[in-house]
């Protein structure tokens, strides 16, 4: 996909994600779901310091295949194969039973390039942003999921994703410390 301004793809991804998720809400029942991919993109850019337009567009679109009627071909046509490949690697196959789905998903993420790892790390970082308002059970579940992804990535984290990995790992460790310490 050829564009004069590489960030035009990012701007289009913002609009596409907003439209694709327009009728969805976060688990709190109040927040438009589109806030999540927007925040994931902001984490990639402002927390991890990465301004690669492919990563930013993939961050914005990371849940579109999994959670909307968007398919891989839609993304290839609008954003190119690089972005679509990242989004596909970040998409769970909801047709599979949960245990099988999670195992297949981890394999996909690990098989992806550094951009997939960075988007997954930003997704985990954002999912932990609501940590303090979750129930204790919700906190444990969220920490467990992000820790599982960190453990899976740790042995082979791509060099380009190491700084992001460190940020998310530090966040997880800080959340494991009991309140008041």
Image: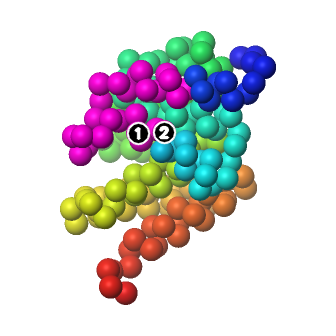
Query: Circles 1 and 2: CB distance less than 8 Å?
Result: yes
Q: Which corner quadrant holds the C terminus?
A: bottom left
Q: Is residue 107 above or below residue 143?
A: above
The single residue placed furthest to the bottom in the displayed view is 181
Q: Quadrant of residue 136?
A: bottom left
Label 2 secondary element: helix
- x and y, in percent, of residue 129 in the image: 40, 57
Relative to 20, 157 lies left or right: right
Relative to 129, 61 lies left or right: right
Other-residue count near label 1 (Cα within 10 Å), few / some / many at <14 / 14–19 / ≥20:
some
Relative to 91, 1 lies left or right: right
Q: Which corner quadrant holds the N terminus?
A: top right
Q: Nearer the viewer, residue 139 or 114?
A: 139
The residue drawn where x is 64% and y is 42% is 115
Question: Which range of residues does the magenta coloring cover?
Answer: 13-38
The residue drawn where x is 21% and y is 40% is 29
Residue located beneath label 2 in the image = 38
Q: Is residue 144 above or below residue 35?
A: below
The single residue placed furthest to the right in the displayed view is 4
Other-residue count near label 2 (Cα within 10 Å), few / some / many at <14 / 14–19 / ≥20:
many
Q: How is the image coloured?
A: rainbow
**Number of marks drawn:** 2
- x and y, in percent, of residue 72 in the image: 52, 19
Q: Is residue 24 above or below residue 75?
A: below
Q: Is residue 176 above or below residue 46?
A: below
Label 1 secondary element: helix
* Numbered badge on residue 35: 1
- x and y, in percent, of residue 98 in the image: 30, 41
Q: Nearer the viewer, residue 14 or 156?
A: 14
- x and y, in percent, of residue 86 in the image: 59, 33
Q: CA distance from mark 1 to mark 2?
A: 5 Å
Q: Quadrant of residue 76?
A: top right
């Amino acid at each position: 996909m050829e564009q004069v301004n590489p960030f035009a793809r990012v701007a289009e991804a913002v609009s596409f994600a907003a439209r694709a998720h327009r009728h969805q809400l976060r688990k709190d029942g109040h927040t438009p779901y589109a806030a999540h991919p927007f925040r994931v993109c902001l984490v990639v850019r402002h927390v991890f310091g990465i301004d690669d337009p492919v990563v930013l567009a993939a961050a914005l679109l990371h849940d579109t295949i999994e959670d909307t009627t968007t398919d891989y071909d839609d993304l290839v046509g609008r954003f190119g194969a690089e972005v679509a490949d990242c989004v596909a690697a970040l998409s769970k196959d909801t047709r599979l039973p949960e245990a099988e789905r999670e195992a297949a998903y981890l394999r996909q993420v690990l098989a992806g390039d550094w951009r997939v790892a960075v988007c997954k790390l930003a997704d985990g970082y954002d999912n932990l942003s609501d940590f303090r308002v979750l129930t204790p059970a919700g906190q444990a579940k969220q920490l467990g999921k992000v820790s599982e992804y960190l453990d899976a990535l740790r042995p082979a984290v791509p060099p380009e994703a190491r700084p992001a990995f460190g940020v998310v790992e530090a966040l997880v460790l800080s959340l494991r410390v009991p309140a008041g310490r």
